[in-house]
Image (tube, rainbow, N blue to C red):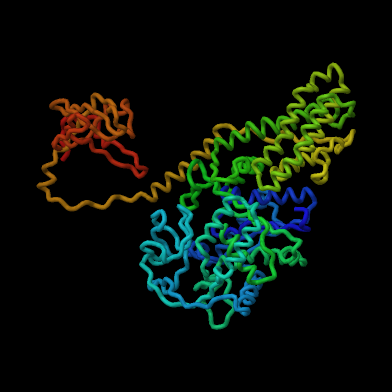
C-alpha cells in the first residue's frame, strides 16, 4: 500500500427496502469497517463511504406492498439502517442516499458525457409489457421458473436460489408480479453500454490484479470467457434518476448505472477535495461487497469508468461469500434472519460480541454458518474466559495492591524476555492478515495478545509474589498493564467499544499502531480506572430464547405457505356408503425391520385383532402409539407389504407443519363402533 497516498473504501449500497441483518454485516460492512479502522490506526489518509440504494424495482415493490410512495419507503429505511450502523459501530465517514439531488445531478452528468461522446448504443428492443397494469416491466417485475435450477419464482435478473444471473426472456413461463398475467412484448428505445467493445480493456484490467480473491477472479473470468454483451443502461420506469434527454419521460437510469456512481456523489458531499479520491492515480479504491455484486463492481462499473475516462478503477474488490443461519440460507421473505436493530435492543451493550462472532466465522472463502450455540461459545469461552479474564485479573490486582497506579519496573526476567519476543511477532502477522483481507486470521493474532497476558500472569503468579516480593509483583503488573494497552490497539479494528473502554481506563487519548509492542507506553505512576467486567457470560436460557424465536418464524412461514389440498372429484352416496370406517384400539406396535416409515400395529376392532401396517414411523415412536384409540378403514382390500398382509388403513390428519396426528374419538367410544 506504500505507493498510494490515500485510500477510498466503499461498502456496497444496500436497498432501502428493509432492515439490516447479519448476512449484510458479515458480507461487506463489518470487514470494511475492520479494514478502515486498521488504516486509521496507522494514521493513513482514508475515507469510508456507503449509503442506501434508493432506486430500483425492489423499492417500488415494497412501496406497493405497504401502500406507500417509494419516497416514504426509502425515507423510513434510510433512517433505520443508518441508526443501526451507527449503534453497531460501523464508522462511515459519510452514509448517503441515491435519492439525494446531488446524486441525481452527478449521475445525469456522467450519463450525458457518455451519451454526447457516442459511448452508448441506442436500440429499439422488445421488452415485456403488462397489458393489465399498462406499463413496461423491469427485471424484478417478472418472475418465472429458473432455466438453470428450475426453481419457481426466479426474478428476471437473478435466481436467488442458485445465484444465476438472468435476463427476463430466459425465464420459463414468465409472469408479471403486478397482475400475475403473462406479459407481452412491445418495442421500446433504450441506451446500451457496449460491454463487448470494452472486453479487451476489461480483460487487461482483471489480468493486472492476480492478487484478487479466487471467488472474485473466478466469477469475473467466467463472464469474460462467455463473452460480454451490450447491457441497457436505462429502464422504462418512473422511479429513479430521470434520463437527461428531452422527449424521454418515463425512462430512468438503470439502477446499476446510478448506484455505483453513488460512491462518488457521496464523497463529493463529504469534502471539497473529493475528486482526488476518485481521479488521482495516487489514490487507491477498495470496494467491499458480497459475492452477488461481483460482476457489477468488476466489469460494469469499470467499463463505465473506462468510457468516462476521468475516474480511477478499483485496486481491490474483496467480496465475501454468504453467511447462513442455523444451517439454512438467510431469507428476509421467510423472516429467517437475525436483524441488527432487534439484536441491539435484545443485547444492549453487546455490539462487540456480535462483531467478534461474525468475524471469527466470516465467509471469506466459502459460505459460513452462524449459530446461536457458537455465538454463546465465542462469548463465554473466548471473550469472557480469555480477554475479559486477563484484563480483570490485571486491574483487580492493581486496585488491591497498588492503589490503581502503574507500579515500577525491575530488571527483566526470562519471563519478560520471552513475553517481548512473542509479542514482537504479532504486529507484522496481524498487519499482513489485515492487508490481505484475511480477517478471521487477523482476529486470532489480535486475541493472541490477551492469551499471552493470561499465560504471563499464570507463570509469574503476582498474587503469590505479593507476599514474598511485592516489588517483583509490581514489576509483573506493570508488564500486565502494558499488555492491556497492546490489547486496546490490536483489537481496536474488531472490538471498538471494548477497546475504547480500555483506553479510557488507561488514560490513552487515541489508539496508535506504532505503540503496539511498546512496553513503556503507560508511564509508571499513571492512575488507572478499573473498567469492570468487559463481558458477561451468556446463559443457556438467553440463547434458547433466540433459537425459539427463529423456530417460531419458521413455523409461522410454514403456516402461511401451507394451503389446503384441492377438493377431490365428487363421489355419489352409494360409493361413500361402501366405506366401512370404524373405531379400534392399538394393543401392540413394533417397528418394521428395513423400513423407516412402517409400524406394524395390532388393532382390536371389537370383533377380533387385526394387523395394520401404517406409514407413521417417522412421526411416532412405538410407545406413543400403544393404547391409542384410532379411526381406521376396515374394509380396505388386504395388501401385502414386506411379507405381511395389512388389513386396513389408519386415518390420519396432516398439520400445516407437515406432522401427522391421529383422528382420535372420545375415550368412551367402544372398539368396533362405526363412523357414519
Q: Nearer the viewer, residue 435 or 654?
A: 435
Residue 549: x and y in percent read 50, 42
Q: Nearer the viewer, residue 523 or 520?
A: 520
Image position of 92 (left or right of 180): right
Residue at (39, 61) in percent of width and height: 144
Q: Quadrant of residue 82?
A: bottom right
Residue 583: x and y in percent read 19, 33
Please say whether residue 84 is visible from this viewpoint: no
Q: Quadrant of residue 114?
A: bottom right
Q: Looking at this rendering, what residue extends furthest in the top direction?
A: 468
**Count of labels shown?**
0
Image position of 230 (left or right of 103): left
Residue at (72, 58) in percent of width and height: 284
Q: Is residue 627 above or below residue 437?
A: above
Q: Quadrant of residue 7?
A: bottom right
Q: Looking at this rendering, what residue extends furthest in the bottom direction?
A: 247
Amino acid at each position: 500500500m506504500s505507493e498510494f497516498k490515500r485510500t477510498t473504501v466503499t461498502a456496497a449500497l444496500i436497498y432501502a427496502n428493509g432492515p439490516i441483518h447479519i448476512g449484510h454485516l458479515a458480507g461487506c460492512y463489518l470487514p470494511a469497517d475492520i479494514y478502515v479502522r486498521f488504516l486509521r490506526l496507522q494514521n493513513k489518509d482514508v475515507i469510508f463511504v456507503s449509503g442506501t440504494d434508493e432506486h430500483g424495482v425492489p423499492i417500488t415493490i415494497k412501496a406497493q406492498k405497504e401502500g406507500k410512495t417509494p419516497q416514504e419507503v426509502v425515507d423510513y429505511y434510510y433512517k433505520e439502517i443508518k441508526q443501526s450502523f451507527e449503534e453497531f459501530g460501523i464508522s462511515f465517514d459519510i452514509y448517503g442516499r441515491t435519492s439525494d439531488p446531488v446524486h441525481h445531478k452527478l449521475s445525469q452528468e456522467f450519463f450525458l458525457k457518455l451519451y454526447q461522446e457516442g459511448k452508448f448504443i441506442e436500440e429499439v428492443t422488445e421488452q415485456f409489457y403488462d397489458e393489465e397494469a399498462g406499463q413496461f416491466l423491469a427485471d424484478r417485475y417478472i418472475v418465472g421458473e429458473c432455466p438453470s435450477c428450475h426453481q419457481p419464482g426466479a426474478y428476471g435478473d437473478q435466481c436467488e436460489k442458485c445465484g444465476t444471473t438472468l435476463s427476463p426472456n430466459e425465464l420459463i413461463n414468465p409472469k408479471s408480479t403486478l397482475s400475475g398475467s403473462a406479459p407481452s412484448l412491445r418495442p421500446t428505445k433504450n441506451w446500451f453500454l457496449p460491454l463487448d467493445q470494452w472486453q479487451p480493456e476489461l480483460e487487461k484490467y482483471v489480468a493486472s490484479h492476480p492478487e484478487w480473491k479466487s471467488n472474485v477472479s473466478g466469477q469475473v473470468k467466467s463472464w469474460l470467457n462467455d463473452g460480454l454483451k451490450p447491457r441497457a443502461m436505462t429502464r422504462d420506469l418512473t422511479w429513479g434518476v430521470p434520463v437527461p434527454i428531452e422527449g424521454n419521460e418515463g425512462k430512468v437510469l438503470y439502477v446499476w448505472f446510478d448506484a455505483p456512481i453513488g460512491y462518488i456523489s457521496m464523497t463529493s458531499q463529504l469534502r471539497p477535495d473529493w475528486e482526488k479520491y476518485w481521479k488521482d492515480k495516487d489514490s487507491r479504491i477498495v470496494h467491499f461487497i458480497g459475492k452477488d455484486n461481483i460482476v457489477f463492481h468488476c466489469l460494469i462499473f469499470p467499463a463505465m469508468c473506462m468510457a468516462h475516462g476521468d475516474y480511477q478503477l478499483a485496486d481491490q474488490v474483496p467480496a465475501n461469500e454468504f453467511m447462513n443461519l442455523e444451517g439454512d440460507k438467510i431469507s428476509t421473505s421467510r423472516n429467517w434472519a437475525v436483524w441488527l436493530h432487534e439484536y441491539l435492543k435484545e443485547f444492549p451493550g453487546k455490539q462487540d460480541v456480535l462483531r467478534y462472532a461474525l468475524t471469527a466465522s466470516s465467509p471469506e472463502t466459502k459460505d459460513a454458518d452462524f449459530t446461536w450455540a457458537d455465538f454463546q461459545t465465542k462469548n463465554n469461552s473466548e471473550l469472557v474466559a480469555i480477554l475479559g479474564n486477563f484484563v480483570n485479573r490485571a486491574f483487580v490486582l492493581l486496585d488491591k495492591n497498588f492503589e490503581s497506579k502503574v507500579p515500577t519496573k525491575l530488571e527483566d526476567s526470562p519471563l519478560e524476555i520471552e513475553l517481548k519476543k512473542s509479542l514482537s511477532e504479532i504486529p507484522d502477522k496481524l498487519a499482513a492478515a489485515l492487508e490481505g483481507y484475511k480477517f478471521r486470521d487477523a482476529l486470532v493474532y489480535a486475541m493472541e495478545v490477551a492469551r499471552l497476558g493470561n499465560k504471563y500472569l499464570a507463570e509469574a503468579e503476582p498474587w503469590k509474589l505479593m507476599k514474598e516480593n511485592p516489588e517483583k509483583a509490581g514489576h509483573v503488573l506493570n508488564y500486565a498493564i502494558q499488555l492491556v494497552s497492546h490489547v486496546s490497539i490490536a483489537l481496536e479494528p474488531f472490538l471498538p467499544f471494548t477497546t475504547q473502554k480500555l483506553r479510557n481506563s488507561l488514560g490513552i487519548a487515541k489508539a496508535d499502531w506504532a505503540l503496539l509492542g511498546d512496553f513503556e507506553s503507560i508511564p509508571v505512576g499513571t492512575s488507572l480506572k478499573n473498567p469492570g467486567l468487559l463481558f458477561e457470560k451468556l446463559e443457556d436460557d438467553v440463547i434458547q430464547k433466540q433459537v425459539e424465536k427463529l423456530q417460531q418464524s419458521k413455523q409461522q412461514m410454514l403456516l402461511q405457505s401451507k394451503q389446503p389440498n384441492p377438493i377431490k372429484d365428487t363421489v355419489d352416496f352409494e360409493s361413500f356408503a361402501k366405506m366401512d370406517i370404524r373405531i379400534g384400539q392399538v394393543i401392540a406396535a413394533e417397528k418394521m425391520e428395513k423400513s423407516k416409515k412402517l409400524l406394524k400395529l395390532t388393532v382390536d376392532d371389537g370383533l377380533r385383532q387385526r394387523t395394520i401396517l401404517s406409514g407413521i414411523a417417522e412421526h411416532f415412536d412405538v410407545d406413543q402409539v400403544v393404547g391409542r384409540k384410532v379411526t381406521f378403514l376396515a374394509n380396505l382390500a388386504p395388501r401385502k407389504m414386506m411379507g405381511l398382509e395389512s388389513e386396513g388403513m389408519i386415518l390420519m390428519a396432516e398439520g400445516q407443519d407437515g406432522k401427522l396426528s391421529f383422528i382420535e374419538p372420545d375415550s368412551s367410544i367402544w372398539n368396533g363402533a362405526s363412523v357414519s
